[in-house]
Image: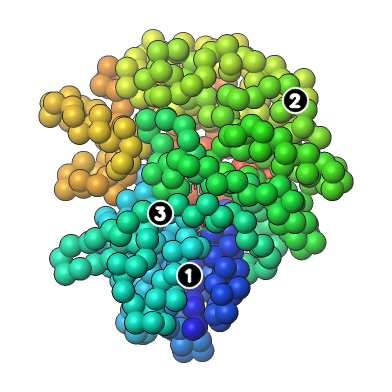
Amino acid sequence: MNVLLVNTNRIQPPIAPIGLDYLADAVIQEGHKVRLLDLCFHEDIESAISVELRDFEPHVIGVTVRNTDDCYFTGAAFFLPEIKRIVQLLRSQSEALIALGGVGFSVAPEAVLGFVGADFGIVGTGEDSFLILLRSIDKGFNHCDIPNIVIRRGATVVRTQPKVFERECMGYRTRRNVDNFRYFQEGGQAGFETKRGCNRLCIYCADPVAKGRHLRLRPPRLVVSEIEALLAQGIDHFHTCDSEFNIPADHAKEVCREIISHGLGDRIRWYAYCSVVPFDQEMAELLRRAGCVGIDFGVDSGAEHILRNLGRDHTVEDIERVAHLCRKQGIVFMFDLLLGGPGETRETVRQTIELMRNINPDCVGVAMGVRVYEGTQMANLVCSLPTEIRKRSLYGDTFDNPHFLKPVFYISPELGEDIVGYVQSTIGDDPRFFIPSTEPAQSNYNYNENTVLVEAIRNGARGAYWDILRRLRCR
Ligand code: B12
């Protein structure tokens, strides 16, 4: 079969569609013909689609939805209308079955499918169910046999039984299906994955909803072969694409050891999202020796009871400890805050900002408001609030948006009016903080259409975006 994969993510600076890079390998290994239409680099998407459909005549089209929105309180960009238009363009010129997939799709599959209007979608990680689907089309398509899909049946959308594929991270990946070098030049980095799933209980997080709680580990030697494949293409700066690199800790350490034993530690520079726990001295040492130069820790808050409310399993003491360990190894680190969660008051905000000042991380990313996702404890909490309190706690598209498809943010009503102003004035002009801002300034922590970053990368900057912005400030 001819399978066309379409990347709809056009955010600048550009991030490569690693999900499609992986999916294409799996589909090719199954014996199908694959083409990847990357709309990120096309000015005129209408004609790019027409040319591709005429040339390739696909039987199935897979469309990736990475981001439904920018999840940024002061930005609130919503990408699904553009993706809907792309699907309409594909539909108007092709009779192929159109499937959606991607993490953005999987955070609210029924609602995204309903909004965008494709034939069906694959929930969660893509490869296995998509291959079963392709086989099933060959044999006369019976959706009941395919796990993890949502499909339109008249006016409703139905979901088939969920299934975890234990071996889904075991496949060989070429990293040749996307123009990774162009993404490196224009986006400053490439991604790699060492596992899927997250078993933590953070009340707001959509990752377990989209990828599952059960961890599926990628063997370290395969992670390294992927890094080597990218290195051979001239790419030497990376970012992990796991929810948290250090969960589970043993696997993270094994990956580091494998990178070190292949002599790559001095040849690459990489960045990771890490949880504050588990993180010990051995982890910090191995990370440094494996070429990890920067870590973004999901710290969230500096007030113990707010951490508990958010379902986090670290303490203020743990936060202080990781700072010490990273500093000892010369690893640059950012602390990510999530302000405005349940129970947050102006006092806990002040306390958190004060703690950051004292610990003195290299930088602090400040997110305001908790993006509410269907299927999370946060969504349950919001739905259980009395109408009056709910009205005062929710921001964004609260009308006729039952699945929280359009961005909706929770902000503790105890914070009162103009909370962004309060946070900004408490932080002042402290250059370590990236604040919620709509300005294209270096303190803007939204990577969506961030012109400062685009320009810096064009001028040769490489690495994680927070580190590029941090370095710009230090100049
Ligand atoms: C790493 C990461 C980043 C890194 C990327 C580094 C890099 N070089 O790749 C950085 C820090 C740059 C980043 C930035 C942003 N990110 Co981000 N990021 C992630 C993270 C942790 C992993 C994404 C990833 O690459 N996963 C690995 C790949 C292999 O998985 P995948 O893309 O999901 O693909 C699989 C399946 O989804 C499926 N699939 C994918 N496409 C298709 C298509 C079809 C047809 C099928 C069948 C299947 C399928 O198959 C693939 C293989 O199994 C996710 C959370 C998560 N755990 O997924 C957030 C996440 C994707 N990011 C998110 C956001 C919002 C952003 C930003 C917009 C934030 C901002 N405002 O600045 C930017 C956007 C940048 C951009 N240009 O797109 C949100 C999106 C949520 C939403 N509502 O849509 C997520 C889900 C985090 C969250 N929970 O809020 N991000």
Residue drawn at (56%, 29%) of the image: 275
Which residue is at the far left?
A: 387
Front: mark 1 or 3:
3
Residue drawn at (43%, 19%) of the image: 307
Whether residue 238 sits left or right of residue 404 in the image: it is: right
Residue 125 seen:
yes
Q: Which amino acid does label 2 sit on?
A: Glu
How many neighbours does mark 1 have within 10 angstroms: few (below 14), some (14-19), or many (20 or more)? some
Whether residue 331 sits left or right of residue 308 in the image: it is: right
Front: mark 2 or 3:
3
Residue that numbered label 2 is attached to = 282
Q: Which amino acid does label 1 sit on?
A: Leu
Front: mark 2 or 1:
1
Numbered mark located on residue 163 in the image:
3
> Mark 2 or 3 closer to N-term?
3
Q: Quadrant of the C terminus?
A: top right
User: Which of the 4 quarters of the picture holds residue 109?
Assistant: bottom left
Numbered mark located on residue 131 in the image:
1
Q: In the structure shown, which secondary structural element does the residue marked by tag 3 occupy?
A: loop
Residue drawn at (49%, 49%) of the image: 448
**What percent of the width, then of the height, locates residue 251?**
66, 38
Q: In the structure shown, which secondary structural element does the residue marked by tag 2 occupy?
A: helix
